[in-house]
Image (tube, coloured by chain):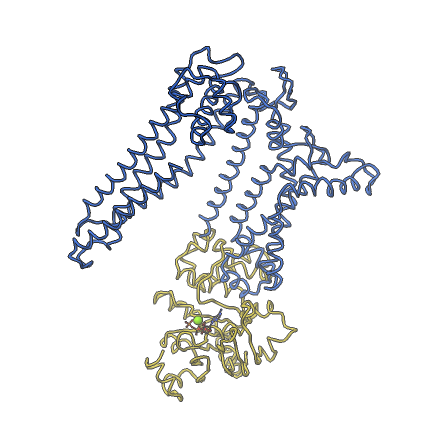
Amino acid sequence: MNDMRLIDRAVDMKDIKIAARDVQVYYGDNHAIKDVNVDIADKTVTAFIGPSGCGKSTFLRSLNRMNDTIDICRVEGNILLDGEDIYDKQVDPVQLRAKVGMVFQKPNPFPKSIYDNVAYGPRIHGLAKNKADLDEIVEKALRRGAIWDEVKDRLDKPGTGLSGGQQQRLCIARAVATEPEVLLMDEPCSALDPIATAQVEELIDELRENYSVVIVTHSMQQAARVSQKTAFFHLGNLVEYGETGQIFTNPVDPRTESYITGRIG
Amino acid sequence: MPILWLICAVLIIAAIGFVIGRTRAISSGQGDIRNLHSLPSYYGWNVALKSMVPAFFVLIVWLIAQPLIISSVVSSNLPETAIPEGSSAGLIMSEVQRTSNGVSAAVISGDLDSAVLADSAADLSAVTEALKNAGQIVTTELTQPIWDAALSYRSMSNAGTTAMWVVVIALAIAGAVWGLRQTNADFRARNTVETSIRYMLIAAASIAILTTVGIVLSLVFNTIEFFRLYPITHFFFGTEWAPSFSGRGGSSELGILPLLWGTLYISVVALAVAVPIGLFAAIYLSEYASKSVRSVAKPLLEVLAGIPTIVYGLFALLTVGPLLVSVFGEGGYLGVDWQGGGRAVMTAGIVMGIMLIPFVSSLSDDIINAVPQSLRDGSYGLGATQSETIKQVVLPAALPGIVGAVLLAASRAIGETMIVVLGAGAAARLSLNPFEAMTTVTAKIVSQLTGDSDFSSPEALVAFALGMTLFILTLGLNIFALYIVNKYREQYD
Ligand SMILES: Nc1ncnc2c1ncn2[C@@H]1O[C@H](COP(=O)(O)OP(=O)(O)OP(=O)(O)O)[C@@H](O)[C@H]1O
Ligand SMILES: [Mg+2]
């Protein structure tokens, strides 16, 4: 079984899940993303790094059209998911977001119980046949979010009553429960202690077997640990994109080198 | 006018105190404000507050107490015989006060020679004539006891006012001196001023609360008075409302149930109209409408809230009532004969509902807008549609606020009067048919107190009992709203 997967993976590595072509994002007059071209591979973890305000979140949100909810935001260029333009008029953003899930930079649990938070996506998309099925999905998602042990006795308590780090893991579990093909994670470990961080990183590694994961992080170590590909953004430009090993050991662009050695940002 | 001058005098003393205090503080710091505990203006304020606050406090108390005390002294000196048959001590005292004030004004305008004031045996008909010429309202011919009482009232008032001037100004000066003596470099003026500001704020809050308490107490006492004249069980459990105005005591039936039923029935109809429409309008405006639609529609909706309720009443009477009759009345489109006349529970309820729409929608709109965008993002990010997001995330998060808005609307519906008077009629009736005329508690309060009413008869006092019931009803509703809001807040914050 495991061997089979390894072979699969070697083949799939070449598949491109998301392709961005000449993407520009504007907030009103503010040109936040400039001419970004990037190919995000399937079954791979891609890390976005860069100084604060360089547009990582903005670009990530344009990958599942979350920017549609911001009035002043405008996206130009093409973003292809499995070869289809997601900004095409035919595409339903709701369907798209079911396939391209997202964990936000700030934890945002719904004002519902912990159980209902996780069951939200599966219920909407009809992923569970019956209650037992749903229970199982919820438990599995909470385990993958590394929070099961902490909440298993209080599943009916409000999700908003958890600590910041617990909320962050709840949101990860919530996103995983919907079984997206691509998972976009915006600084998922920013409020986590080293143990929970390690568990989330383990989850990311596990998700890689089936999904494509894009993670924004401010931790160079984390990017180096979990990702296979790394993209470095600076002032809205994609400065450098390549194998994680190469970016961290042998960056081409001097700005990348300055950033990862701690001189800018 | 003299009181205004007194206020000015105190303010001037305080202003002078402020300047002196400030200067003194600077000089006590050897001209360098860094040596002072507080900024110099705090020392000035300390002096000004110490001179103003006690002086004004005494002034207010004096102004309230003096007429009361003098009246009671004068009226206790009035001989029994001075009170004619069919009148009361209160009426005579107001006559005395009018005369006294009239005399003062007439003396100033020169219509009355001040010599007559010293003369208790003055020619009263001449005085009455002079007062009438001076344009003072003196109802009847002055009598000797009233004239005597008016003179003593006047002299006591004058003495009291003079004493008030002296005391208030002395207090202002004493306060200023006290403040100035405190002023030196180490005095913690900033803290003192801070404390006094806190007390002033507390005083403002207390006035608001005490007024409420006063209103409630007046309701309570009059209600108790009513229940002495009319059995309490008949009031609360009587199913008939038939006041008699002929004054044949004891023949009135004053049961609140038909009125309460009308109030609740009309309010329920109104809420059934206002809540769905208002809430859906709010959801459309806050979640779906584009900026340009919103910027036009929201103010338009709020114009509805600015229409006086009497206009809604006219609308009910002239438009909605006949319209309903043409549908539900005899020979109407439906061929049923449910509605006899334009005035009906439905008419008033629908129009009241229309009145409440902007109320519900603008409150709900604010509440829905306050739900953080990040919650919506979270839901969209999981592939939820807009209506799923609204139904499952936004509305539950906004629910406590929306419940509060609905209960506030209910309070308004219960308290509404004009629409009911014009739209629902004046017949108190216990009936289930919403197309029949009924009336409400508020409408009956109005009709019991309009016209010649004798405020000691149960027919008039019942208004207080009705008002008290209404007050308790809305109070209960508000407490319930608070409870709901808190319960959900506990759960979701
Ligand atoms: N909703 C918005 N409206 C207007 N401008 C925005 C909005 N969100 C982001 N921006 C602007 O876009 C630029 C990129 O912001 P973005 O949030 O993508 O940065 P980031 O790289 O994620 O930063 P951080 O690491 O601090 O999260 C910034 O200049 C920011 O001011
Ligand atoms: Mg960000």
Q: Residue at x 64, y 22 (%)?
A: B243
> Looking at the picture, does residue A204 appear above or below residue A22?
above
Residue B336 or residue A135, whichever sits in front? B336
Across and down, in percent, residue B162 comes to 32, 30
- Asked which quadrant contains residue B205, the reply is top left
Q: Which chain is blue?
A: B
- Asked which quadrant contains residue B240, the reply is top right
Residue B43 or residue B111, whichever sits in front? B111
Q: How many marks?
A: 0
Q: Residue at x 49, y 24 (%)?
A: B130
Q: In the image, is B340 to the left or to the right of A247?
A: right
Residue B379 or residue A178, whichever sits in front? B379
Q: In the image, is B24 to the left or to the right of B150?
A: left
Q: Residue at x 38, y 41 (%)?
A: B204
Across and down, in percent, residue B141 comes to 52, 18
> Looking at the picture, does residue A56 appear above or below residue B475?
below
> Looking at the picture, does residue B214 appear above or below residue B118?
below
> What is the residue that sits farthest to the bottom in this orientation?
A252
Where is the C terminus of chain A found, in terms of image quarters? bottom left
Q: Which chain is yellow?
A: A
> Looking at the picture, does residue B399 appear above or below residue A256?
above
Split into quadrants, the picture shows ligand 2 in the one at: bottom left
Across and down, in percent, residue B43 comes to 24, 50
Across and down, in percent, residue A216 comes to 44, 73
